[in-house]
Image (cartoon, helix red, strand yellow):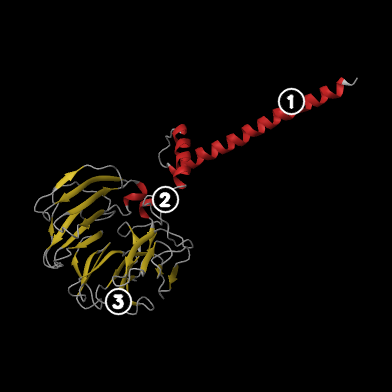
């Protein structure tokens, strides 16, 4: 009779162990399924994934995170209390601790500590009903004078907020705003309230004559010769969303024209401050629906690179060593797909 309770205890032990093992397996499966779910989300829209490699990558990531910032890695500077992507960034040329950031859905932000510190950024009240700031330009001679281009639009006269077509996301703008007191107060420089789809993606100030300003966006390229008091359309090309200026010869301008609803596609250049334009890539690249992003080498400005993209994919990379006297076109890894097709690629 004394053995019977021992058998009962042993039976209870095995039953408990069985259920405990099942519970552990259930927990392990729950963790595993969460890995798979996360992988499917981050891998969207592609559904193929290799589960073993995914877990190995996760383990590697944990090890790498222990050595954060030891090998010149990127450091998150904030802000951590703002919603939306950062569309533009500008640095005060006379005080590099003074940074300005334009967000996609939370307006303009400012840091006076070089962006360091989780609470280093503060939101700037503009006094206008605008959420998206796509471009910021600071006067290189007098940094108290600033211009911001409002709105975020990737299609000409067409949007659904990205609800059904992510290519049509964004926010309406009000035009170009100007400040003469380092961002404390703002006034309207270019009133686009009657053109809600007008978005200014790039504002460039002539460093040799800061009264001259250029603004490129969904409705073309505009020029002001009186510090933003009046504006004139100088390139009537829809979706002129990129503009760079030669660092030594500001009369030389290079524009990237392309986007949904545009009437042309390619790279245009002017050598007289925007009076005359020539299409550099005429017949060289097929039409597309994505943005063209351009960068110019500040030290060797004869060297220019342009990333050509279509909807959801990279088309090619254009490079020149002689300011487009001739240029080469080469294929490139697809860095402009999906989220990146309208974001910065250069």
Q: CA distance from mark 2 to mark 3?
A: 40 Å
Whichever of labels 2 and 3 marks the residue nearer the N terminus, that label is 3
Q: Residue at left 17%, top 45%?
A: 329
The residue that label 1 is drawn on is: 14
10 Å crowding of disc 2: few (<14), some (14-19), many (20+): few
Q: Nearer the viewer, mark 1 or mark 2?
A: 1
Q: Is residue 191 visible?
A: no
Whichever of labels 1 and 3 marks the residue nearer the N terminus, that label is 1
Seen in the picture, residue 173 relative to 53 is either above or below; the reply is: below
SS category of the residue bearing label 1 = helix
SS category of the residue bearing label 3 = loop
* Residue in the foreground of this view, choosing between 138 and 238: 138
Q: Nearer the viewer, mark 1 or mark 3?
A: 1
10 Å crowding of disc 3: few (<14), some (14-19), many (20+): some
10 Å crowding of disc 1: few (<14), some (14-19), many (20+): few
Q: Quadrant of residue 207?
A: bottom left
Q: Quadrant of residue 115?
A: bottom left
- Furthest residue to the left? 325
Contact flag, marks 1 and 3 (Cβ < 8 Å): no
Q: Residue at left 48%, top 39%?
A: 59
Rendered image: mark on residue 145: 3
Q: How many tags in the picture?
A: 3
The residue that label 2 is drawn on is: 164
Whichever of labels 1 and 2 marks the residue nearer the N terminus, that label is 1
* Residue in the foreground of this view, choosing between 34 and 169: 34
| Left or right position of 276 against 35 | left
Estimate the x, y position of residue 83 in percent, counting from the top left: 46, 60
Q: CA distance from mark 1 to mark 3?
A: 78 Å
Q: Quadrant of the N terminus?
A: top right
Seen in the picture, residue 18 relative to 136 is either above or below; the reply is: above
SS category of the residue bearing label 2 = loop
* Residue in the foreground of this view, choosing between 337 and 26: 26
């Amino acid at each position: 009779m004394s053995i019977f309770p021992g058998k009962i205890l042993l039976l209870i032990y095995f039953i408990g162990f069985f259920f405990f093992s099942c519970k552990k397996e259930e927990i392990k499966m729950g963790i595993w399924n969460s890995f798979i779910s996360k992988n499917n989300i981050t891998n969207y829209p592609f559904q193929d994934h290799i589960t073993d490699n995914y877990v190995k990558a996760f383990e590697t990531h944990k090890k790498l995170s222990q050595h954060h910032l030891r090998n010149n890695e990127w450091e998150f500077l904030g802000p951590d209390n703002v919603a939306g992507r950062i569309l533009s960034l500008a640095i005060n040329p006379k005080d590099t601790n003074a940074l300005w950031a334009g967000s996609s859905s939370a307006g303009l932000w400012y840091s006076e500590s070089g962006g360091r510190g989780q609470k280093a950024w503060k939101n700037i009240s503009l006094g206008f009903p605008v959420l998206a700031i796509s471009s910021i330009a600071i006067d290189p001679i007098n940094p108290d004078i600033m211009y911001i281009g409002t709105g975020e639009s990737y299609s000409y006269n067409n949007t659904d907020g990205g609800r059904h077509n992510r290519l049509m996301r964004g926010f309406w703008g009000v035009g170009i705003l100007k400040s003469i007191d380092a961002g404390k107060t703002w006034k309207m420089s270019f009133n686009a309230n009657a053109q809600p789809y007008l978005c200014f993606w790039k504002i460039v100030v002539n460093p040799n004559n800061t009264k001259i300003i250029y603004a490129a966006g969904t409705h073309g390229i505009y020029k002001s010769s009186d510090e933003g008091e009046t504006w004139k359309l100088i390139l009537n090309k829809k979706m002129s969303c990129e503009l760079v200026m030669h660092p030594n010869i500001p009369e030389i301008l290079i524009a990237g024209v392309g986007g949904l609803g545009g009437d042309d596609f390619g790279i245009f250049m002017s050598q007289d401050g925007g009076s005359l334009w020539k299409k550099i890539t005429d017949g060289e690249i097929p039409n597309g629906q994505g943005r063209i992003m351009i960068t110019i080498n500040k030290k060797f400005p004869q060297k220019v690179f342009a990333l050509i993209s279509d909807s959801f994919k990279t088309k090619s990379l254009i490079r020149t060593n002689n300011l487009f006297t001739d240029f080469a076109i080469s294929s490139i890894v697809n860095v402009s797909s999906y989220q990146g097709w309208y974001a910065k690629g250069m």
